[in-house]
Amino acid sequence: MRIDPGRINPLSKLDLQTRLIVGFLIATCLTGFVAALVGIWTINKSTMDEVQNRVRQDINTAKLIYNYTLERMASLIQFSAEGSDLYEALGDGKKQRLENLNGLIRHVQVIQTSGEHPFLDMLSVIDMNGKVLYRAANPKINGDDMLWDPVVRKCIETRAPQASTELIPIEKIIRENPSLAERVTIEIVKTPKSIEMEEKQLSEGMVMQAAYPIMDKKQKLLGVLIGGVLLSRDRSIVDKVRETIYHDEKYQGREIGVATIFQGGVRIATNVMTTENKRAIGTTLSKEVYQRVIQEGKDWVGRAFVVNEWYITTYTPLYNSDRKLIGILYTGILEAKYRDIMWKMIWIILGITTLGMIIAFIISLRMGNTIIKRIRILKKATEAIASGNLDYRLSPDKISGFDMLDEAFNDMSKSLKDRDERLQKAHEQLTRSEKLTALGGMAAGVAHEINNPLGGILLYGNLVLEDIPENGATRENMKKIIHQTNRCKNIVQGLLDFARTPTGDMLPLQINDVVRTALNLVKDQALFHGIEVETHFAENLPEVNGDPSRLEQVFLNLFINAADAMKEKGGRLGITTSSIVDRVKVIITDTGKGIDQAHLPHIFEPFFTTKDPGQGTGLGLSIAYGVIKRHNGFIDAESAPGKGTTFIISLPSCAAGGSGNGTSRDFPAA
Ligand code: ADP
């Protein structure tokens, strides 16, 4: 079954350009997406860590302020308790003096700024049995027992100062100071996220208390001075916290930082505002915070929904003197500010990544286009090569970085062309060789057949000539017959030389010697006037196995042909010998008229000549071909018409198994 590649990879259905674009798009989008995600995550985490660290520090400051308030109150009580008039009043029973204490009670109900004297909500003098001697904020009621109050009880028992926050039933608070009735009454307000509370109203109030023992000079306990500050609806602590930590900073009209004192899970003193811009007194904790802080007694640090806003918050439990959890101290920073900063950063990151993505995409698109353009150019070039245009070349494009490919292509087409030329040449040589072989066979047959009759004609012709008297009329005619027959015989002999090339003894010889002998035979002849001969004979050439007279004949022929080609203008005849691997090479160059390209394939054929009738037989080169072939050698010609001709002969050296043995590679005999 064939599997459609499109089903495996949908991209493979698209063309290359679209595929590249889609690929780049996916790559850039993926990178951008991951970068943005990591960026956002990092920012989110570091911002949140930073804010949480900050709120952790804030709650410590808030605790300090809370404890400082308690300590300050304790100092005030101590200062008053140690005052001589109180001691004296208790000593001599002059209760009027106690009325001076009245000045320490604050009468302005709710609105009061922290740190201003007086700031006590309640103050009583208790005798050593726990009975109230004097109530500064409610002087009419006294004589009742105060031992229910753990602070009073512990102070009498230990005779040491006490200070702690306690929950006190509302009626007892009102008894201490009737004007606190309004402050201490707190209705529980239900909010969507708040905890379920059974009661509708708080039945107790949270009071910061400090008690100090009153002693006489003999260190005898006379009584206790106890004072308290009702935390319900008290603004001093929470506003002090806000002012100290957050410097009353605002964000979009809202307080950036808030603080709250909880009694149980209910806000009793806070600067968290409701939507009606009232202090959120009576609202309750969210369930999660309630569970962790009230039930488990642990701190809470993190996001929390407070009344109607998200805050980064810390909640820490508050305990009474019996280490019982009675409330919570809370600070929070408006999340909105950090959220907005975060979003701003996120948008910046998104912007930068998008921009980066676009730039990366454009760059990759352009690169892709360059690649595709280059591929198209290469395709065109390949098509040109395929259609046979081996001269097609690419101009190396350094800018696109494809020059390596271009150069490789050019190298390839060049070597293709070289190979093509070599193949063509080999083919030509093969064809020529086959043709010459066929011709040789025929020539040998014809020559052989004609040679015998010609011998007969010559024999009888000479016999007849002998019989004709010296001055016989037919004698001249007979001589002409014999002359022409001799010519025929020579031609036939030439043909036989080409075809069968009888060779004499084959012996090891120095090709340089053979070439020199041939050259010496001709170089002084008239034909060579005006021709400069230049020889380069390589030394220590390996010997060649050959028939020296036959080889001499070959070189003679080539020299004469060269001189013939240069006879009009003169020129230079170059002769070079060399050896390559196991062959000896002779190169003969002339600067003559050259050979027409159309003639070149035929020059080794018998009777091919361009010379005037009677000037050449056209057998010279064919005999040379036959002789060299007989020596297992190779002869070829190259020519540039008008410039000259080069003949190359290569013969196997003796070391390579010697030259021809006179029988091998012969033309088929008739
Ligand atoms: P011939 O010399 O009798 O014409 P060859 O077989 O020796 O016969 O040469 C055949 C032909 O090859 C010549 O007619 C000539 O056209 C050409 N030829 C051979 N050698 C040269 C050469 N060196 N320069 C130019 N043409 C040449």
Image (cartoon, helix red, strand yellow):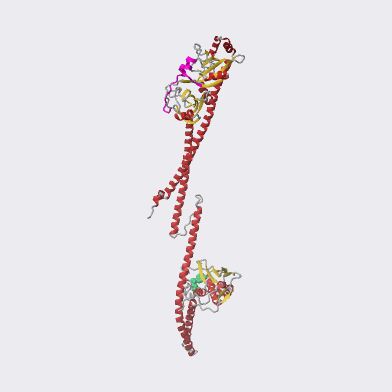
530 and 433: which is toward the camera: 433
Quadrant (top left/top right/bottom left/bottom right) for the C terminus: bottom left
User: Could you tell me which residue is drawn at 44 percent across and 48 percent down?
Assistant: 20
- Image position, residue 640 (x, y; %): 50, 66
- Image position, residue 379 (x, y; %): 44, 54
305 and 99: which is toward the camera: 99
Counting the numbered discs, the total is 0
In the rendered view, tell whether residue 383 sits above or below residue 300: below
Quadrant (top left/top right/bottom left/bottom right) for the N terminus: bottom left
In the rendered view, tell whether residue 330 sits above or below residue 468: above
Q: Which residues are magenta?
A: 166-194
Determine the residue located farthest toward the left in the rendered image: 1
366 and 488: which is toward the camera: 366
User: Could you tell me which residue is drawn at 51 percent across and 35 percent down?
Assistant: 46
- Image position, residue 432 (x, y; %): 46, 70
In the rendered view, tell whether residue 393 sits above or below residue 663: above
Determine the residue located farthest toward the right in the rendered image: 218
Q: Is residue 73 visible?
A: no
Instruction: Inspect the magenta stretch and tell me whether residue 179 lies in it.
Output: yes
